[in-house]
Amino acid sequence: KPAGLTTQRTRVSAHRNLEALLRAALGDPDLRAVHRLDRDTSGVVLFARDRASTAALHAQFRERSVDKRYLARVAPAPREPAFRADGALERVPAPSTEPAPLVFRVGDGPDARPSVTDFTVLRRGADDALLEARPLTGRTHQIRVHLADRGHPILGDVLYGDGASAPRLLLHAARLTLEIGGRVTTLRCPAAPAFD
């Protein structure tokens, strides 16, 4: 999935979303996304062709048995070679009644949900670093919030960083490993040159 395209239908993207585009291109109205990526995140997205397959694959995501790996370019670089972020996430109240993007923060309020992400530094640059992120839970904006909370926002993140550091959010879903048809399968999506 390219950055800037939603995975499924939203209020503002009823027809221009990956699921609708693939259904039209393949002539398959039953095609369904098994999981979602944020609009600004690129990478691998899994689809199924029937309800039974969708339900079986979705159950693996719900049971947290899918190994998900993301690439993120951050600045400044973390000092430690690997670390775990385990702050619970809670939604930040919208400032008005106007439609606003979902925004989360690490917090301990009554609606905060446990969230855990493991990070490994793959490469350090002069001012930034390339990290591998492995979310152990699947909360909205989890990787983005955990990195920003630790002082390492993702380059190009307009919600949790300065947004001006890159032309797009440099977060990429690089790999999914799960069971398909009784076999463990790894699906990969190469990252754009901006991650080099």
Image (cartoon, grey):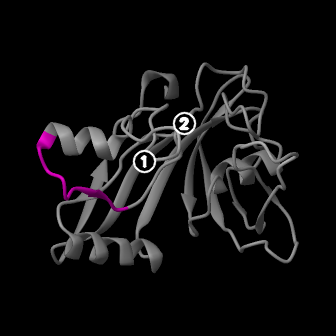
Numbered tag placed on residue 170 in the rendering:
none
Q: In the rendered view, would you say 149 is above or below 3?
A: below
Q: Quadrant of the N terminus?
A: top left
Q: Amino acid at mark 2?
A: Asp
Q: Secondary structure at mark 2?
A: loop
Numbered tag placed on residue 40 in the rendering:
2
Q: Residue furthest front?
A: 97
Residue 112, quarter of the rendered image: bottom right
What x and y, as percent, mark residue 78?
A: 75, 43
Q: Amino acid at mark 1?
A: Arg
Disc 1 designates what residue? 9
The residue lying at 54 percent from left, 36 percent from top is 40
Magenta residue span: 26-34
Q: In the rendered view, would you say 192 is above or below 188?
A: above
Q: 125 or 35: nearer the eye?
A: 35
Q: Secondary structure at mark 1?
A: loop
